[in-house]
Amino acid sequence: MPIAPETFTFESWRHAVRPLLAAGKNADDLLWREHLSTAAADSASVTAQSTPPLDKASIRLPRSLMALLDRLACYRTEDRWELMYRLAWRTLFENSQLLKDPADADVSHAMRMDRAVKRDIHKMHAFVRFREITLVGGVSSFFAWFEPQHEILRKGAIFFAKRFPNMRWTIATPDGAAVWDLSSLRFVDSGTLTERPSADVKEDLWRTYYRSICNVARINPSAMLREMPQLYWRNLPEAAEIGPLLQEGSARFAARHHQADHEHFTRAKSVRRSLAQIVTSPEGVQSCRACEIWQHATQAVEGSGPEVAQLMLVGEQPGDEEDLHGAPFVGPAGKVLDETLRAAGLDRSDLYLTNAVKHFKWEPRGKRRLHKRPSVAEIRACNGWLQSEISNVKPLVIVALGASALLALTGKSCTIEAARAIQMTHAGGARIIATYHPSAILRADEKVRDRLRASLLGDLKRAGSWLKITRGRPTLE
Ligand code: URA
């Protein structure tokens, strides 16, 4: 049974768009509505400029695209269906390799949506908390209330059917409920369910356990909030413990740094300020106010790449195009980086790319927004986000592109020329390789440009070969 019959599901969308794709209807000329039916879809394209039609047998979309579209259909936004159609149409009629172009605006938008959906499914697996109910006849059943960001109930519920096949359980969400009756999984309207059970005794035990395993001295608030975003807290029994635990951790942290030298003290202050800001932020980095840069940026640009990657590249801050697209290194510097990565035999899709500072800092120059270097204080204020990316992605090698990235990674101000000659290691164990930023190549005059380009290429090759050497070894030396 469809969870919300008045809206599309992936299957009904697929059914509706097939004839439109076969007729070559141009994506931009279709009128999209959440409840577009097949008939409406046919008539929606009356004025459409059509590309020469395909026969139905040739509407073969790559499997990877179909899997992506299936996930995008879960993303809670009205324009998902339109974007999905555009991706399908452009893959068929414009560029069969479209998904391989991360700089394309549709692709980068889709990738961001895809990451959000995957993260939401992952969070559902981690944060569903069952309460026991005893049914008539003494049979036990388990009930959980979960509020996902996106429409991921169907995808997320399969995990629980495999994990708890011998329990009767229901996971209810605002979009509908998944019910497992020991043999089959059904999806029903949440309104048909009886009331939610109140807290059970096991929750006190669970909270006590949570308090006892939490090491407040080592708590890393930004990493913790990335793992357990605040929007999930209201349905987590242990969430009531988090505030007091964080306060305790923050007080200990501040006390430890109170007698330290000025450098440490300033850092402690900025970490405490980010901590206060992080704790009150439901959306993580998108609502970061730890420094002033956010005020003039379109959005925070998060890192992009696999959840776990052996190689991480850290730039300085997003540029004009990155700010608009919401993805790192998609502008002119990204082009230089891509060319050099290719020449070094590295595949961008294997790497995790991010920046020391997540918002674009700029000053107006006529109609242009001119990049302005972030200050040391701004790099520090943003550092919690970078460090939490490093602890999640677990790279073996981190390449610092330019002096700001190097400062963010090592806490040291040093020229790239000097840093290239030093062996450096991140506190988490990864090897750090410092090199020139691709923008430095774009800005350099002809005489030095080739030398900088050759250095960047050599350093990226070094990072790649160091990984090859490291692969298979359990730890870093
Ligand atoms: N420069 C950077 O340092 N990062 C980007 O993402 C783009 C340009």
Image: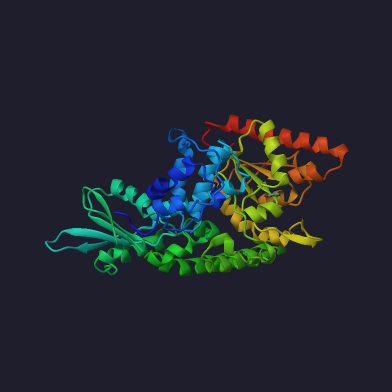
Q: Is residue 421 above or below residue 108?
A: above
Q: Is residue 218 left or right of residue 2?
A: right
Q: Is residue 402 above or below residue 54?
A: below
Residue under the point 66% across and 33% down: 342
Residue 340 visible, this angle: yes
Total labels: the figure holds: 0
The image position of residue 70, as x and y in percent, is 43, 46
Res 291 → quadrant: bottom right
Res 267 → quadrant: bottom right
Q: Nearer the viewer, residue 186 or 145?
A: 186
Q: Residue furthest front?
A: 46
Residue under the point 45% across and 41% down: 66
Q: Quadrant of the N terminus?
A: bottom left
Q: Residue furthest left?
A: 137
Q: Is residue 185 left or right of residue 386?
A: left
Q: Is residue 204 left or right of residue 334?
A: left
Q: How is the image coloured?
A: rainbow
Residue 371 visible, this angle: no
The image position of residue 39, as x and y in percent, is 40, 52
The image position of residue 51, as x and y in percent, is 56, 41
The image position of residue 136, as x and y in percent, is 13, 64
Q: Nearer the viewer, residue 282 or 319?
A: 319
Q: Nearer the viewer, residue 37 or 147?
A: 37
Q: Quadrant of the C terminus?
A: top right
Residue under the point 66% across and 50% down: 409
